[in-house]
Amino acid sequence: MCVVGTALSPKTRFQILLEPERLALGRIQERTAAPVASQIRRAVEKWIAEQGEKVERKRPASRKRS
């Protein structure tokens, strides 16, 4: 498991394989500018919520302006 730290929140990297039919994600990205990774993340969060699990998203801490 690879944990990737970002300025927003730590994330775990997963490798997934998609069938060629899933290339619609690329067309959706062209139309809506929503990156494929974001589309997949939203779909997984929705599926987890439908399974009755609570999806907690950590909000990034406010940055102080100097």
Image (spheres, rainbow, N blue to C red):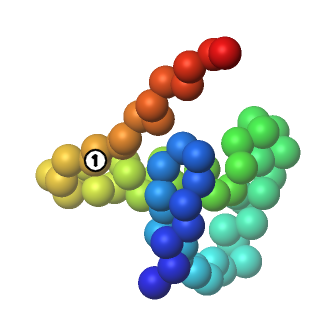
Taking the view exactly as shown, the residue that stands out farthest to the front is 66
Q: Quadrant of residue 20?
A: bottom right
Frontmost residue, 16 versus 63: 63
Q: Does 35 sit above or below residue 1?
A: above
Report if residue 1 is visible in the image: yes
- On the image, the x and y values in percent for residue 24 come to 72, 59
User: Residue at 55% across / 25% down in the picture?
Assistant: 63
Front one among 11 and 55: 11
Residue at 80% over, 52% down: 27
Give the number of callouts. 1
Q: Give the secondary structure at mark 1.
A: loop
Horizontally, is 51 left or right of 43 in the view? left
Q: Nearer the viewer, residue 64 or 15?
A: 64
Q: Is residue 66 above or below residue 58?
A: above
Q: Is residue 28 visible?
A: no
Residue at the image position 63 percent from the left and 16 percent from the top: 65
Q: Position of residue 28 (x, y in %)?
A: 74, 47
Q: Is residue 6 above or below residue 62?
A: below
Instruction: Give the class, few, some or many, for how many residues have Cα within 10 Å of label 1's Cα (few <14, many ≥20).
Output: few
Against 37, residue 61 (above or below) is: above
Q: Residue at x 63, y 78 (%)?
A: 18
Residue at the limit of the structure toward the top, as seen here: 66
Q: Which part of the image, by quadrant, shows the C terminus? A: top right
Lateral position of residue 22 relative to residue 54, left or right: right
Foreground residue among 64 and 31: 64
Direction left: furthest residue = 52
Image quadrant in which you'd find residue 5: bottom right
Q: Amino acid at mark 1?
A: Val
Percent from the top left, x then y, of residue 41?
51, 55
Label 1 sits on residue: 55
